[in-house]
Every structure is written in C-alpha cells, then in structure tokens.
Amino acid sequence: MPEVELPNPEELEERAEKTFSRRVALTTAVYAVVLAIAALGGNNAMKEMLLAQQQSSDQWAFYQAKVIREHQYRGQKLLLEAQLAEPASLKGAERAKFEALAKRFAEEEKRYNAEKKDIEKDAKKLEAERDRHQKRDPYFDFAEVFLQISIVSASVSILAASRPMFGFSLVLAAAGAVLTANGFLQLFTLPFLHHGGGH
C-alpha cells in the first residue's frame, strides 16, 4: 500500500495567508479606485457650487442695474406728470412733446420691470443650483474619510493577518461607496451633514 503524504500544516497556513493577503491587496485596490471617484466627485461639486455662486452674483448685480434704471425712468415720468398736471405751464406742441416723453418713460419703466423679473428668476435658479452642489459636497468628503480609513485598515489586516480587521475595512469601504454614490445621485439626506441650511 503506497504511503500517503500528508501536507505540512505550516505550509497550508502559509498558503492560506498568501491567499488572504492577495485577496486583501486586490480589495484595497478597489477601495483606492472608489476613493479616486469620491475625490473627483467632491472636486466637481465644489467647482460647480462656486461657478453657480459666481453666476448668481452676476445676475443679482444685473438685477440691481435694472432696478436703478427702472427707478430713474419712474422718477423722470413722475416729474413730467407733475409738470403736465399744471395746465398753465405748458401749451400746445410743447405739452404734446412732454406727454409723449412721459409715455416713453412709462414704457421704459415697464420694460425694465419685466426684464428685472426674468433676471430674478435666473438668479434664483442659479442659487438653487449652488445649494444642490453644496449639499452634495459633504457626502464626498465623508466618503473620502471612510475610504482612506478602510485602506489603512486593510493594510493593517495584511500585516496582522487579521480577518476581523479586514471585515472592518469592508464595512468602512461599503459606507464610503454608498456615500460616494449618494454624492452623485442624492438618493437620501443625512441631516447632520447639512447644518446651516445651505446659506
């Protein structure tokens, strides 16, 4: 009867440790990819937020200019109307000229008022856009923290050959991945990430 050679227990353990280390190393590479995506998402959210803020500020400045022009025309119209209210002060062609001018000023005042409302709508849309990007940003920030800690935990699990430590890294990485996805998709809101109400 041939002799059966039993595997050396130390060799089996070493092979299992190598397999575990390889698995953890591959998983850590996936963590790093998700971390890069979270960082990119965070940078883009911040850029979009700042751009929308700048654009809304420009719109509000434009709005103010329209308001000033509207008030100037209203003031000139009221001045002409006051002069026209005194029948003795203006006669014939001069009165007609003042009436036409008062009418033109009234039309300009109306035009600036309408334009101002459109600009206000645009400015508010841009503010809403800014707020949306501002709400996305913290999810990416927290995702980055969780993913960085998961990478460190996975590295420690290789050095210590610790499966519980690897399990801990998986939980952190999963949380980081969920927060990253939410930064892009805004599927849920965590109130503690939105202190200050967006303004």
Image: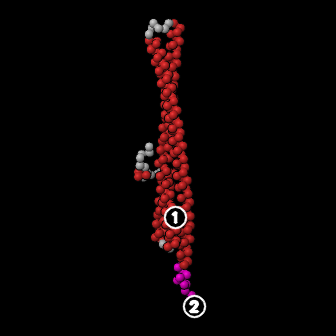
Q: Residues within 10 Å of mark 1 (few under 14, many from 20)?
A: many
Q: What is the basis of the colouring in this image?
A: secondary structure
Is residue 193 visible from the viewing direction of this image? yes
Q: Is residue 30 magenta?
A: no
Secondary structure beneath dot 2 equals loop
| Residue carrying label 2 | 3
The foreground one among 158 and 9 is: 158
The x, y position of residue 148, in whole percent, is: 51, 61
Nearer the viewer's eye, disc 1 or disc 2? 1
The x, y position of residue 196, in whole percent, is: 41, 47
The x, y position of residue 128, in whole percent, is: 48, 41
Residue plotted at (49% across, 63% down): 149
Instruction: Indicate whether 98 appears above or below 37.
Output: above
Q: Are marks 1 and 2 in contact (CB under 8 Å)?
A: no
| Residue carrying label 1 | 151
Residue plotted at (48% across, 59% down): 145
Instruction: Indicate whether 55 appears above or below 173.
Output: above
Mark number displayed over residue 51: none
Q: Quadrant of the N terminus?
A: bottom right
Instruction: Indicate whether 15 appears above or below 177.
Output: below
Q: Residues within 10 Å of mark 2 (few under 14, many from 20)?
A: few
Pointer 1 or 2: first along the chain: 2
Which residues are the magenta region? 1-13
Secondary structure beneath dot 1 equals helix
Q: For the view shown, which residue lies furthest in the right direction?
A: 2
